[in-house]
Image (spheres, rainbow, N blue to C red):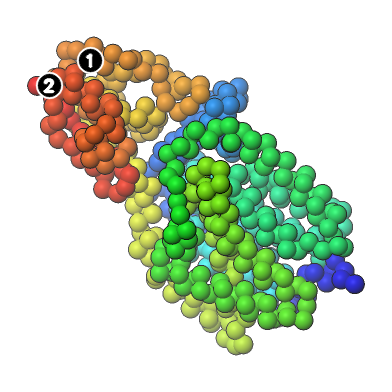
Amino acid sequence: MTTAATLAPPTAPPTRRRAAPPWVMGGLAALAAFSGTGASTLNGDELATISAASRSLSGMFELARHIDGHFLPYYLFMHFWGMAGTAELWLRLPSAVAIGVAAWLLVELGRRLHSTRAGVIAAGVFAILPSVSYYGAFARSYAFAAAAVVFAFWALHRAIKRPVGRRWVVYGVAVALVCSTHLFAVLVLPAQLLLMRRAVAGRMVAALAAGSVPAVVLGLIGFGERHAISWIPQRGPEVWLKFPKMAAGTTTLGVALFAMALAGAVLLWRAHRRDPARVWAFVLAGWLVLPPVLLLAVSLLVTPVYVDRYLFVTAPALALLAGLAVACLPRLQTAAGIVAVALGCVLAFPDHVEVREENGRFENIPWALRVVKAEPDDGIVYGQSQLRTGFDYYADSLMPVDVLRSGDSPDADGFGYPERSDLSAALEGRERVWVVWRGTKQSGLEGDGVPRVGEVERAGFELSSARHSGDLPGLTVALFTRR
C-alpha cells in the first residue's frame, strides 16, 4: 500500500558544498526586481493602490463594497505600510521582497524535488525574467501572489513527505495566503489535487478547505463587482500562443524556457519513473499550464476575466521546470546552468531596459506634466476622473486650474473624484484648456470615446495641439484654445 512518505521524492545525495544558500538567491532576486523600482513612474493600477490604501479603514471597507473587494487584504497591508511614506521606492519595496521570498522557496522546492543545484538554477532563471523585474517593482499584489503560490507547493511537499499536524497547518495557511493575495492565484491549486492519495486525503482536503475560505469570500465579493472589469474584452484560445511571453515577460526567452520546462517535466518523470513521486512532474506542469486554461474557461463561461497579469503566478513554475531540465543533464549541470542564465540575460536585455524606462508602466504622468506648459488662468480637464490621483502625486505648484474638481477626496465607491457637471460654465472666462486622457489621440479626438473632449469642443474650444506618450495605452495631452 502506498504510504504518505513515498509520495515525495527521495532527498538527493548530499553534496560536499551547496551551490548557494537559499537566502542568497532570494536576496539576489529581490535586488534584481528592486533595481527597476525607481525608474518607471507609477501607473494607474499603482495609483489605485495609493488611493485605496490612503483611506481610513472604514473608507477601505466602503470601497471594497463597490470595487476591488478582492484586493482588500493587499490594500489593508499597504494601508499600514504606507504610514511610513508614499515614495515610489517605498511603495514598491514589498513586491521586491516578495520576489526574494519566492526565489528563496524555489531553491528549497527544487532541492526537495531533485537537488540544490536544480533549485539554484531555477531561482537564477526566475530572477532574470523581465516579468519578475516588472511585477517585482509594481505596487500591486502580483508578486505577493507568486510568493504565496511557491510557499503553498513547498508546504505541500513537506506535509506529504512527513504528514504531521503542524505541517498541514502550515499548508493550510499557505493556501489561505494564495487566496488572499489575488483571487485568480487559486487557479494553481487544482494541480495540487494530483497529489491526493488515500493516506493523506483527509488532512489535505481539510487544509485545502480551511485555506480556501478567503477565496470563497473574495470570490463572492468579486462576482458581485464584476461590472468593475467590464472593460476586459472576451478572448479566445489564441491567447495561449502569447502565454510564454506573458510568463517570462519576453518572447524569445519565453518560448525557449517553455520548451525547457516541458523537457524538465519529462526528465523529472523519467528520473522518478519507479517512484510514486513522479507525479510531481504532472503537478509542476499543471502549475504552469492550468491557470491560463482555467482563466479562459472562466472568461467564456462566466464573464471575461482573461488578463495577462493575472497569470504571473505561473512564472515560478516556468523557472523551476527549466531549472530541473538543466539539473537533470547527465553532466556539466553547473556550467549549463550558468550558460542558461547568462544567455537568458542577453536575450531578455532589451525587455529589461524597456521595463526600467520612465514609461515602463505605459502611463507616464511626469511626461504629461512636462508637456503641460501652463500659462496664468489655464484650465485642465481630465478625460478620466481618476487620473487626478497621479497628477496630485507628481504635480508641482505650476498646474493649471482643475476647473471641474468639486472635492479633495476620491469617491467613496471608486477611484474617481466628485466633479461639476457644468463644464461650459466652469470654463467661462478662460482662453486655454488642457485635456488629458488615458489612451491614444484618436480615442479622444474621433468619436465619443472620451466624452469630456466633445464637451470642451461644444464649450467653444478647438484643438491646438495634441501629443501622445508613445506606448499603448499611454496618455494623451491636448491643448484647446477658444475659437
Position of 469 relative to 20 (above/below): above
- Which residue is located at x 54 percent, y 60 percent? 315
Callout 1: few (<14), some (14-19), or many (20+) C-alpha neighbours within 10 Å?
few
Q: Residue 326: x percent and y percent?
A: 57, 78
- Secondary structure category for the residue under label 1: helix
The local crowd at label 2, few if under 14, some if 14 to 19, many if 20 or more residues have their Cα within 10 Å, is some
Amino acid carrying mark 1 in the image? Ser
Quadrant (top left, top right, bottom left, bottom right) of the C terminus: top left
Estimate the x, y position of residue 90 in percent, counting from the top left: 50, 41
Q: Mark 2 falls on what kind of element?
A: strand
The residue at the far right in this view is 1
> Which residue is at a point 72% across and 74% down the rendered structure image?
278
The label on residue 424 is: 1
Disc 2 from disc 1: Cα separation: 12 Å
The reply to whether residue 259 is visible in this rendering is yes
Asked if residue 84 shows in the view, the reply is no
Q: Residue furthest front?
A: 301
Residue drawn at x 35%, y 63% as measured from the top left? 350
Query: What is the x, y in percent for residue 55?
Result: 53, 25
Q: Quadrant of the N terminus?
A: bottom right
Would you say 138 lies left or right of 402 here?
A: right
- Compare residues 291 and 177 and report the one nearer the observer: 291
Location of mark 2 (residue) = 482
Q: Which mark is residue 402?
A: none
Q: Residue 405 sits in which quadrant?
A: top left
Q: Nearer the viewer, residue 199 or 170?
A: 199
Disc with the residue nearer the chain's start (2 vs 1): 1
Instruction: Identify the residue at horizontal 41%, vertical 63% (top origin).
Output: 250
Question: Horizontal and vertical percent for residue 152?
Answer: 70, 55
The residue closer to the viewer here, 208 or 340, is 208
Q: Amino acid at mark 2?
A: Arg
